[in-house]
Amino acid sequence: MSLIVAENLSKQYISGEITIDALKGLSFEIEPASFISFVGPSGSGKTTLLNLIGCLDVPTAGTLMVSGMDVSQLGRKSAANFRGKNIGFIFQDFNLLPVLTVYENIEYPLLVVQNTPLKERRKRVLSLLDSVGMLEQKDKYPDQISGGQKQRVAIARALVTNPKLVLADEPTANLDHKTAYMVINIMKKMKDESGTSFIFSTHDQKVVGEAEIIYTLEDGELTERSDKGGDRHV
Amino acid sequence: MNSPKEAIKEAIVMFNLLRIAIRNLIRYKRRTLLTASLITIGVVFVLVFMAISGSFKNMMVSQITDSFLGHIQIHKKGYVSSIDTLPLTMNMETQAIKKVKKAISNVPEIEAYSMRIKFGGMFSNFVETTNVRLNGVYPKEEIKTVPLFPERIIKGKKNIVKGEILVPELLAKGMKVKIDDIIVVIATNKDGSVNGKQFKVGGILESATGPGGRDGYIHIDDALEVLRMNEIQISEIALRINDFANLDVAYNKLRNILSKELNEESKPIFEVHTWEKLSPFYNIARMIDAMTFSIRLMLIAIVLISIMNVMIMAVYERIREIGTIAAIGTLPGKILTMFVLEGFSLGILGALIGNVIGVSVVYILNISNITFDFGRQTGLVLSPTVNFTDILVISTTVIIVSILASLQPAFKASRMEPIKALRHV
């Protein structure tokens, strides 16, 4: 069963008297345990699409199934519940909570969102800290670590709830090339270890190459899908 | 209903939300300290004001009730409304007195009582004559009921002796009488016949504010003689309660018992009044209470405005954080709780420090032995006290208001669209 099924997915924004078609009838399917990138210029609809998949927004038309659930009409509370159980997020600006340590930031979704018991929490957090190479920094606060380290923590936080899907909007935009590669490689490694699908949007052509499937968006339309093997669909 | 396991889980989540809230407060140290200081100042001000005004009020009440009024008075129905004329026709007679005594014996909160014959007469020093209001009392009972009475005797014997009169200070000055002078009291009894009796001036009595505060005193046997009463007749019975806090209890018991005593027309024979209904000082006491209430309202306003302000700022500054936690699945209710806990913690902090400082200030005032004058009484020592109930009421008020003040900003945070919040710069 596909992890994500989108059919004729559209999103319009109305600003005063102007209607902006951010997404125009997108249809695609994404399989579980995929490593997928959405690329395209600014304003092409990448972030809008990730927001829809992440249940942060609802489509204007079309249907969107995520993990077997129609998420196109979810209410605020149901959407929050669904996100907490099924989706992890990695943000461009890392968005770690400044008052929590590295350990506590990763622990937060288990503690506040999922009410996971202490033992299980500790096991999962320490394991992920180890996987992203941040075990020694676990007691530091976000302002005491570098950008690359912050993004590694964000990856661990996104994965700690064992989500089916991790969405990353421009996860490497604020990182240098070397760190960006490292972060993408960690994401790949985590995908292989956990079987979680990663979908990320990016501008960075070098990073794009690491994705298994690349969707190209232009003016709210899917213009191309290219697989790592070299297959191209227009 | 939640199972105990789920309740424990929820408690752990609450504890962690509280921990995050406290860390957020620590994160903005200066702002937190400023807001907490404002609440602290408010709490200290209210506590100290309540302690001082309470002390002043208690002292005044005690001066009035313990020096002449008593805590409760019993009269024949209608007497109080005609008290200015001191009508002898409205005195309680033997049967009525027996009923009152029986009622008193059924109220254990009553510590002592004093029967008084009150009457008006003429006071003559053989040169001049003037009006006088007199109380005929049993000295021992009177002193038990109003124990500060002897302190009002500024000259002469600190007692009421048969054949002697305690003359009110102003009357003594006006009539130029001194201790051991002989004067005559002339009075008309209820049958209309006039009688007079010579008295030796046994003491000069300090005036006091309130009804009966400028009356002279004689022994009750002398009063009976002047008024030519064959049987005892009583104008009022003043009562003393064992603990002032039991005033209402004793009053209600007594009123319940005596309200059942009806005359032939099925109307009550007696009327019972607490000092509050008899003394004009009660209005001053009520003003003090009203001022205390106003000060409490000011504290509420301080807490409400300061916490609301700081929480609105906190929400505005942390919009992206709110977006992040909402995006990763934090339910709106938990976001609301997190911000409410922040306001709650600020309230607790302010109330805690305020109570500690407030109690310390009250303690310092106590050991400083500050004195003040009230009317003719000088050198009264201010002894402010704070009781646990006051602290509890103030702290609860501050905490409840803190929570209420946080609700609007917290609600705003919980209703924020994560997508908009994440875009916020």
Image (cartoon, coloured by chain):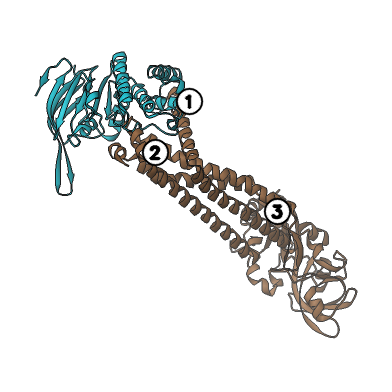
- Residue under pointer 1: A139
Q: Amino acid at mark 2?
A: Leu
Q: CA distance from mark 2 to mark 1?
A: 27 Å
Q: Amino acid at mark 1?
A: Asp
- Image quarter in which the N terminus of chain B is found: top left
The residue lying furthest to the right in this view is B180
Q: Chain of mark 3?
A: B
Count of marks overlaid on the render: 3
Q: Chain of mark 2?
A: B
- Give how far across and how far down residue B229 sits, in percent: 79, 70
Image position of A32 with respect to A169: above or below = above
The residue lying furthest to the left in this view is A234
Q: Quadrant of residue B85?
A: bottom right
Tell me the brown chain: B
**Residue B102 visible:** no
Q: Nearer the viewer, mark 2 or mark 1?
A: 1
Residue A194 appears left or right of B122? left
Q: Secondary structure at mark 3?
A: helix
- Give how far across and how far down residue B292 sits, in percent: 58, 57
Q: Chain of mark 1?
A: A
Of the two numbered discs 3 and 2 on the same chain, state the one appearing first in sequence. Answer: 2
**Residue B51 visible:** yes
Residue nearest the observer in this picture, B374 or B48: B48
- Residue under pointer 3: B365
Give the residue drawn at x 51%, y 45%.
B30
- Give how far across and how far down residue B236 sits, in percent: 71, 64
Q: Is the same chain shared between marks 3 and 2?
A: yes
Residue nearest the observer in this picture, B157 or B318: B318
Q: CA distance from mark 3 to mark 2?
A: 43 Å
- Residue under pointer 2: B336
